[in-house]
Structure formats: C-alpha cells, structure tokens
Image: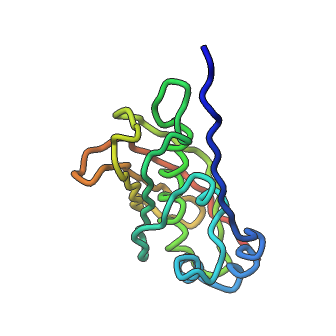
C-alpha cells in the first residue's frame, strides 16, 4: 500500500508573553476584548488548532471551529484532545471575563463527556461557556459543544483556582 502525499499546513501566531504583560494592567474582560480587537495576541493554541473567538461578554465566551482532517485521530474522527481544548478555551475565557485586574486562574480539574463523534461532515461547531459558581478562591465553569442546529457533541466542566497576578 502506497501512502498519499503528506499534507502541509502553515500558520503564524503572536508572542504570548507580550499578552501576559499587557493583561496585568487590565481586567479579564478588558484583556479578552483587546485580543478580539487584535490589540493583544491570542493564545498560540487558538491558531494551532484553527479555533476562532465567537461571542464575548461578561460571564460568557464561545469559540468555534470547522473540523478538518488535521484535527483527526487514527480512527478518522476529531481527536478528543481537540474537543477538550475548545471546551477548555470557552470555559477559561468565560471565567476570565469576570476576573478583576490582578487576578488569574489555573485549572484544578477538567472533565469532558463526548456525546457524538465529530468529523468534517459535522460542520461548524461552537463551544459556549457558562459560569456555574464564582467564589473567592475557586470557580466552577461548564461548556457545551454544539452544531448550528443545537445538537450537542460534548460537554465539559472545569474547576479553577483563582490566584493573584501581582
């Protein structure tokens, strides 16, 4: 069996450390809006996986992507890590949109349920985050991955620890 020609993909990204410095003087929502306006670099992961920032408001963030061949696992469907990454991005930015200046977070626990197989024929999928609880030291966030008809493909929940960035 002869293999077909290797595929190739080229992309670029901004320096994430510049964004980290900029974020120190902004609230979480201000920083995310700066990213959306192109005034701060997005996470390199977003470009690597070809995600796009969708809705962004206080307490809500969404990302979308169109499943491509480069997202696939050896079984011919989108790798669970890609699905987890887009859910995690939506949950993280949902939380980030509520953080005051000088506060950051880290994930303590992440759980994902895969409900349907995702492949190129699935069309554009959107991960939308929603706050469940925001406390003084921890937060609980959820996200769903859905298609344009509202069909759910995956669901995630994340527990995060809030930290001082000063």
149 vs 47: above or below: above
Q: Residue at x 47, y 28 (%)?
A: 76
Closer to the camera in the image, 37 or 24: 37
- From the viewer's perspective, tell me whether residue 166 is left or right of residue 151: right
Residue 115 lies left or right of residue 110; in this view the side is left
Which quadrant: the N terminus?
top right
Q: Residue at x 69, y 66 (%)?
A: 13
Residue 12: name its quadrant: bottom right
Q: 56 or 44, which lies in front?
A: 44
Which residue is at 42% across, 63% downward? 62
Of 120 and 59, the residue lying toward us:
120
Give the image location of residue 160, x and y in percent: 58, 55
Residue 25, position as x, y percentages in the image: 69, 86
Q: Position of residue 131 (x, y in %)?
A: 41, 62
Quarter assignment of residue 34: bottom right
Residue 79, percent from left and from top: 52, 35
Q: Quadrant of residue 6?
A: top right
């Amino acid at each position: 069996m002869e293999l077909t020609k290797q595929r190739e993909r080229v992309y670029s990204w901004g320096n994430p450390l510049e964004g980290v410095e900029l974020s120190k003087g902004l609230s979480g929502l201000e920083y995310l809006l700066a990213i959306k306006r192109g005034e701060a670099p997005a996470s390199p992961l977003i470009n690597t996986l070809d995600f796009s920032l969708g809705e962004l408001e206080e307490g809500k963030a969404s990302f979308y992507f169109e499943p491509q061949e480069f997202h696939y696992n050896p079984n011919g469907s989108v790798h669970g890590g890609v699905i987890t990454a887009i859910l995690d991005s939506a949950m993280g930015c949902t939380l980030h949109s509520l953080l005051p200046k000088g506060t950051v977070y880290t994930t303590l626990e992440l759980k994902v349920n895969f409900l349907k197989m995702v492949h190129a024929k699935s069309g554009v999928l959107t991960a939308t985050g929603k706050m469940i609880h925001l406390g003084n030291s921890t937060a609980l966030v959820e996200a769903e991955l859905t298609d344009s008809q509202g069909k759910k493909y995956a669901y995630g929940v994340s527990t995060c620890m809030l930290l001082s960035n000063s």
